[in-house]
Image: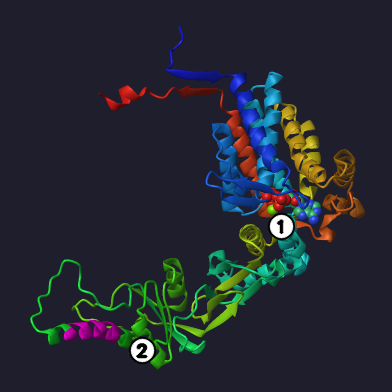
């Protein structure tokens, strides 16, 4: 007797086929955007907002995927984005291929559990092989290695043509935020890098600035444009004319007293400002408004005041320059005071004009050295995509600077692993052998797709790559060892030593994407039943 379910149920091969189809559909969307010759996608949402992107995670996030298995893939690229920042397209393509091949094996009557065990083993072996044989320490490659990593990441993007300019900027920027930790290891908190977008000029005019930038100007013309040895006050309350709270009634009999009230209202704000200035502040950042009448006090004191600073920004500035964000001047006794200890310091605060916008730069802050990238571009879509590409590149540069290890790109790692796993599978006498062979074959989807996207002959190139990698793994000759770095030269439709050509990626990106792709494929493969409950009829839900 079967259990009756109010809804639909799909199980066994049916659900596996449905899942594979859904996952394949998602992967096919991003497939054509992989690699330096990948194309972009234009996405329009329901209110007509346009996004043009080449980034796997962004594309998938913008698609409102309904199918539960396909959602796993969307989640997968998000995870890769969060953990590594780059490689979001590759991870999805590999996961979909792994799943497709696993499903074929199930059709040949191999139990999913065996396939899962085989995939896990293959993943472990691959990671070990990358660590032992394929990764290269950056120290042996010189300073250009880091630049090349950034360039490889930028190559596939809209700003690929300017990759030299951007790579330089990004590497300088990430290197500048490095902090030496307690164990002498250097950490690169990329949160200290602020990326600002400014419409106008071309992408090449983007600049890197040593300091924190706010995209506003000073509030009055009379204020100085540059202050050295700045003492910064961060206020999270407004400096408007003082007002009594709503609902408070003051009855005035004499007209003279009314005037007095007005004057006193202005004086309260004046006193507040003077307390702040007397404590030594010469730069005052306020998250809310500053009344126009109050500006003259700052001008007289030769201080810069900036209003409507973003709360997140002011917190960051306060943390880095050693200031305190005050929500009121009131102390425990009910008096309004401003202590000098609430001030932070910076070497210089200046106002500069770039394009159509004024920027306030805070340079040389006490605790950390913030860096700012100001991106330029012809329109909003280009700027948004530039920002995403720069973010990817910043992430990979950080990864490489921290782990000091790279692998060769352009399909080299995937082909090497594929050849290795194939021979590894043959050393096993168990049922997992087939699964490992399929895993090996799945990895080739990356070089294949790269070649196809570049309008090159994928079969021919793949055969050449396989030959070189097989030669490098079967021989101990010094010259043939170099062959493990053979990857695709997409522009010329040839194979070449990509280590020499400088196509490099962080090792951690490859390792994590293998791990995540395998886990995602396994988690979908484990599903053998989909029970979808029918929504309850409206009447019952109301309970009336
Ligand atoms: P992802 O979102 O996965 O990072 P990309 O579109 O950035 O996707 O493409 C990355 C792939 O392109 C990697 O496999 C990388 O090795 C390859 N690649 C990047 N630049 C080159 C190049 N100059 N020559 C060959 N392959 C390249
Ligand atoms: Mg990339």
Percent position (x, y) of residue 244? 20, 73
Is disc 1's CB within 8 Å of ligand 1? Answer: no
The reply to whether the magenta stretch includes residue 249 is no
Q: Is residue 167 left or right of residue 352?
A: right
Tell which circle, 1 or 2, labels the residue nearer the N-terminal end. 1
Find numbered disc 2 in the image and state the secondary structure of the residue it sits on: helix
The image shows residue 346, relative to residue 370, as above or below, that is below
Q: Is residue 126 visible?
A: yes
Residue at the image position 88 percent from the left and 42 percent from the top: 457
Relative depth, front residue between 352 and 463: 352
Query: How far is mark 1 from mark 2, CA to CA?
Result: 48 Å
Quarter of the image with the C terminus is top left
Q: Residue furthest top?
A: 1
Relative depth, front residue between 426 and 90: 90
Percent position (x, y) of residue 410? 79, 50
The reply to whether the magenta stretch includes residue 265 is yes
The image shows residue 336, relative to residue 413, as above or below, that is below
Percent position (x, y) of residue 91? 66, 44
Q: Which residue is mark 2?
A: 297
């Amino acid at each position: 007797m079967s259990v009756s379910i109010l809804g639909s149920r799909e199980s066994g091969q049916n659900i596996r086929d449905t899942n594979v189809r859904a996952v394949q559909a998602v992967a096919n969307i991003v497939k054509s955007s992989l690699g330096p010759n990948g194309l972009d996608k234009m996405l329009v949402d329901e209110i007509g907002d346009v996004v043009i992107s080449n980034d796997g995670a962004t594309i998938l996030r913008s698609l409102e995927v309904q199918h539960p298995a396909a959602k796993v893939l969307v989640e997968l690229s998000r995870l890769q984005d969060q953990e590594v920042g780059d490689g979001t397209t590759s991870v999805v393509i590999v996961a979909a291929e792994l799943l497709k091949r696993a499903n074929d094996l199930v059709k040949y009557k191999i139990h999913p559990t065996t396939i899962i065990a085989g995939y896990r083993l293959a993943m472990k072996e691959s990671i070990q092989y990358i660590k032992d044989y394929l990764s290269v320490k950056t120290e042996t490659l010189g300073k250009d290695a880091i630049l090349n990593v950034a360039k490889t990441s930028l190559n596939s993007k809209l700003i690929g043509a300017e990759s030299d300019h951007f790579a330089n900027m990004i590497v300088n920027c990430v290197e500048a935020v490095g902090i030496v930790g307690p164990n002498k290891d250097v950490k690169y908190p990329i949160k200290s890098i602020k990326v600002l977008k400014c419409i106008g000029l071309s992408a090449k005019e983007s600049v890197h600035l040593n300091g924190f930038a706010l995209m506003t100007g000073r509030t009055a013309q009379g204020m100085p444009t540059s202050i050295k040895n700045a003492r910064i006050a961060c206020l999270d309350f407004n400096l408007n004319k003082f007002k009594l709270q709503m609902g408070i009634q003051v009855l005035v009999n004499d007209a003279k007293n009314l005037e007095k009230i007005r004057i006193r209202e202005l004086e309260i704000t004046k006193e507040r400002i003077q307390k702040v200035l007397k404590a030594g502040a010469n730069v005052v950042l306020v998250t809310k408004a500053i009344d126009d009448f109050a500006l003259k006090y700052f001008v007289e004191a030769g201080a810069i005041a900036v209003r409507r600073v973003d709360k997140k920004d002011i917190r960051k500035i306060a943390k880095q320059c050693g200031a305190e964000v005050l929500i009121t001047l009131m102390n425990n006794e009910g008096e309004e005071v401003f202590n000098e200890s609430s001030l932070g310091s910076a070497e210089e605060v200046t106002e500069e004009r770039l394009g159509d916008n004024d920027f306030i730069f805070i340079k040389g802050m006490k605790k950390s050295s913030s860096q700012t990238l100001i991106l330029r571009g012809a329109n909003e879509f280009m700027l948004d995509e530039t920002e995403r590409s720069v973010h990817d590149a910043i992430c990979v540069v950080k990864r490489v600077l921290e782990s000091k290890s790279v692998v060769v790109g352009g399909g080299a790692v995937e082909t090497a692993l594929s050849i290795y796993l194939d021979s590894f599978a043959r050393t096993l006498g168990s049922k997992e052998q087939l699964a490992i062979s399929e895993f090996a074959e799945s990895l080739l989807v990356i070089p294949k797709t790269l070649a196809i996207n570049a309008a090159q002959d994928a079969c021919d190139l793949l055969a050449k790559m396989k030959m070189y990698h097989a030669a490098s793994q079967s021989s101990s000759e010094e010259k043939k060892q170099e062959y493990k770095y053979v990857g695709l030269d997409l522009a010329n439709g040839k194979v070449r030593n990509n280590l020499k050509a400088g196509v490099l990626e962080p090792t951690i990106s490859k390792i994590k994407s293998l791990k995540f792709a395998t886990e995602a494929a396994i988690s979908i493969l484990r599903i053998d039943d989909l029970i979808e409950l029918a929504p309850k009829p409206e009447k019952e839900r109301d309970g009336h």
